[in-house]
Structure formats: structure tokens, C-alpha cells
Image (cartoon, rainbow, N blue to C red):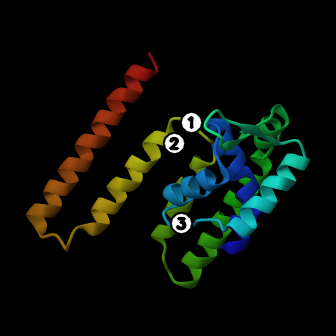
Amino acid sequence: MQSIRRGHLKFYILRLLIEGRRTGYGLMKAIEAETGFWKPSAGSLYPLLSSMKEQGLIVEIAETDDSKRWHVTDAGRSAYDEAAESKRELFDSMRRSLIVFSKVFDAGPLESIVDRLSKWQEGRQDFRTLGPLFMDVHDALWALPSLNDPQQDEARHILEQTIEGLNRLQSTASD
């Protein structure tokens, strides 16, 4: 996991800087807030920022409040766009690892999750906001205690209503 994070930190920084200018500390805090568990160290972040500056991917701009913020260059935007291959490789590696895990530990339903995970690879921008809601539904289901039959029926009804609503949205979106 550490090597995955280290290998993709450059692209993470580029994505954050495409969204807006940030200080080095601001980049560390944004990554920690988004991931919930990873805060790159100053010892890994600042040398990488210097290297990215030398490569012409980012520039440091003095702000009016005496702070310095990093800003992505056109070359940095291009490098991020070209990172699609790296993204595909990472997803493919994760997919293969999960399939092996499901076989080793006889976790068959995990294979259907792997198939669904592959669809996230398409990079739909709307999933940046909707994807976390999907995961919240997943987490809410897992947080439930064992349900009796009437409670299972109620949970099924709630989920079926959600699916029906999304299907209605799909039919209106394609019109």
C-alpha cells in the first residue's frame, strides 16, 4: 500500500492543484481529509514538489498574504491527463488482487464487487460526488445489526425504492 501511495502522490498533487492553488501544508491536509488515513510527510511531499517544479509541472506563486501557493502549469495538466494509463494499471492490479483474494478465501460475492469496481474505471466526473453517497449506503447496510424478517423486508423495500427512483432518472436522462 505504501508503494501505491508513494507512486501516485505526484498525480494526487496534480489533481488537487488543478482544483485550485494550495500550500504544501494545504496539500498534506487535503490528502489526509480526503483519504481519512494518509497524510504524506513533509519529507516526502516537499522534495516531490521541488522535483515537480523542476519538471515544469507546477510553479510556486507568492500570494498577497505573504504565503506561497503551488499552482499547476499547462504541462502539469497534460501530465495528469496522460496519467490515465497509470490509473488503468492501478485498477487492473487491484482487480486482479481482489479476484485472487476471493478465490483463496472462498469469498465469491467479492468477484461481483470486482466487476462493479471495474466500472468506476470509466472516470465519470459525476461519481466524484455521487460515489461517496453510494459508499455511505454500503456502510449503512454493514452497520445494521442482524435483521429479523420484517426488518429485512423493510430494508429491501427501501433499497428497491431507491433503485426504482434511479431507473426513473435514467429514463428521463436519456430523453
List the residue tagged with mark 2.
128
Residue 67 is left or right of residue 47, and the answer is left
Identify the secondary structure beneath mark 2.
Answer: helix
Which residue is depicted at the point 50% across and 68% down? 110
List the residue tagged with mark 1.
125
Amino acid type indicated by mark 3: Glu
Residue 126 is left or right of residue 138, and the answer is right
Q: Quadrant of residue 100?
A: bottom right
Front position among marks 3 and 1: 1
Amino acid type indicated by mark 2: Arg
CA neighbours of label 1 inside 10 A, class few (<14), some (14 to 19), many (20+): few
Task: Look at the picture and state if 117 lies above or below 162.
Answer: below
Identify the secondary structure beneath mark 1.
Answer: loop
Task: Look at the picture and state if 5 lies above or below 88.
Answer: below
CA neighbours of label 3 inside 10 A, class few (<14), some (14 to 19), many (20+): some
List the residue tagged with mark 3.
111
Q: Split into 4 quadrants, where in the image is the N terminus? A: bottom right
Identify the secondary structure beneath mark 3.
Answer: helix
Of the pair 77 and 72, the residue shown nearer to us:
72
Amino acid type indicated by mark 1: Gln
Residue 104 is left or right of residue 53, and the answer is left
For the view shown, which residue lies furthest in the top direction? 175
The residues bearing labels 3 and 1 have C-alpha atoms spaced at a distance of: 25 Å
Of the pair 58 and 78, the residue shown nearer to us:
58
